[in-house]
Amino acid sequence: MLNSTRNFVSSDMETAPLLEVRNLSTYYVSASGTRIVRAVDDVSFSLRAGETLGIVGESGSGKSTLALTLMRVLPPAAQIVSGAMRLEGEDLVGKSENEMQHIRGKRIAMILQDPMASLNPLFSIGDQVGETLRQHEGASRRSAWQQAIGLLKSVRIPAAETRVTQYPHEMSGGMRQRIVGAIGISCEPRVLIADEPTTSLDLTIQAQYLNLLDELRKEHGIGLIFITHNLGIVAKMCDQLVVMYAGRVVESGPVRQVFNAPAHPYTAALLSSIPRMSNRRKRLIAIDGQPPDMSNLPPGCAFASRCPAVFERCRNEAPPVFTPAPGHTARCWRSAPEMAGSVAMSVGALS
Ligand SMILES: Nc1ncnc2c1ncn2[C@@H]1O[C@H](COP(=O)(O)OP(=O)(O)OP(=O)(O)O)[C@@H](O)[C@H]1O
Ligand code: SF4
Ligand SMILES: [Mg+2]
């Protein structure tokens, strides 16, 4: 429970990754087996304790499927076809559903985009917030109820003693979102995945909620994975950035480095599409052209049809992962060592 604050020390950040994902692939396969969508394709990244990792990418690029894979709550049509994911060194891919039930919610938890989809209209807030505690910590109903009140207070819900007796429909959108957040953190997970948790909130509540998540991360050393379309949030909240395109990680690295010197033309386009100065929300703006059909990817680079820096090789051969700088990766032929200096894509610095 939150009150029993785990002492997080900064040296935790220097130890092994909390979560390590290597060459992970998840495909959706149609019932006939003829249509395969490579929603997560050869994805690698790692997350350390106390760190926030932002995942960005256009709609359909595989962000939510990646999150569902990490939680092992994929729909029946989806399969993890290869790769590894290790939580505190422990493999998650090979775990049975029974084993995952002891890990999910307790060691790795997720806040969904739509709070109404995660809350049951028939149960009180107290029962729903206390549920994970009863399941994982063996708390009695009475104790879980008391802890639920504490959790509601910790996510800054006023009159928590009254709110805990109410039902989801009696809450505003912002409150429901915070309740889903309270459920997410109830067992102090080591990794918390937030899939666009602020889309339904107005700007003031959004800022409060983001501050809250950030405080929880600092206080408890949670590794936070933040899926968002909002690059302003990435700049404010995240240490590391993963950029997805057509199921693949096309660029990754420290946020400041990627923002200052994007190595992949897609990232450069995303960053240059942020209107400067007056834009406070910094949402992604559409880039010309369409993402490819995920069930019929081109043989070369998936971004080739939209890329301003495309050249012949791109259309025939898919680029591997290059390392333009330590800790910075890009899946682009322009980052191949022999192409060094061929493309300048510095599109503005973090303000
Ligand atoms: N249940 C499903 N069955 C088949 N294909 C699916 C299913 N869910 C998602 N997909 C496909 O998988 C790909 C990745 O979808 P996903 O929802 O992971 O993208 P996303 O990046 O989270 O998008 P958004 O930003 O819109 O939330 C898309 O091509 C999508 O159409
Ligand atoms: S590999 Fe080629 S097409 Fe793909 S992003 Fe790089 S330059 Fe553009
Ligand atoms: Mg999604």
Image (tube, rainbow, N blue to C red):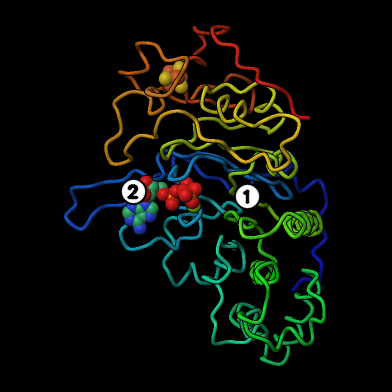
Q: In the rendering, at what x and y percent does residue 143 appear? A: 73, 88
Mark 1 surroundings within 10 Å by alpha-carbon count, few (fewer than 14), some (14 through 19), many (20 or more):
many
According to the image, label 2 marks what residue?
A: 27
Within-10-Å neighbours for mark 2: few <14, some 14–19, many 20+? many
What amino acid is at disc 2? Answer: Tyr
Image quadrant where one finds the C terminus:
top right
Residue 324 location (% of width, % of height): 58, 19
- Tag 1 secondary structure: strand
Helix or strand or loop: what does disc 2 sit on?
strand
Q: Position of residue 279 (x, y in %)?
A: 71, 37
Viewer-side label of 1, 2: 1
Residue drawn where x is 65% and y is 27% of the image: 258
Q: Is residue 61 left or right of residue 185?
A: left
Instruction: Report the residue at 78% width, 74% height from top.
Output: 157
CA distance for labels 1 and 2: 22 Å
Judging depth in this view, the residue of 279 and 308 nearest the camera is: 279
Note whether 240 is above or below 88 in the view shown: above
Q: Is mark 2 within 8 Å of ligand 1?
A: no
Q: Is residue 291 above or below residue 304?
A: below
Residue 117 place in picture, x, y as percent: 51, 70
In the image, is the residue at mark 1 within 8 Å of ligand 3 by its beta carbon? no
Q: Is residue 78 visible?
A: no
Q: Earlier in the sequence, mark 1 or mark 2?
A: 2
**Residue at the spot of label 1:** 226
Q: Quadrant of residue 31?
A: bottom left
Q: Residue at x 42, y 15 (%)?
A: 310
Q: Is residue 61 above or below residue 219?
A: above
Using the rendered view, name the quadrant where residue 208 is placed.
Answer: bottom right
Give the quarter of the image for residue 137.
Answer: bottom right
Q: Amino acid at mark 1?
A: Phe
Specify the quadrant that holds the N terminus: bottom right
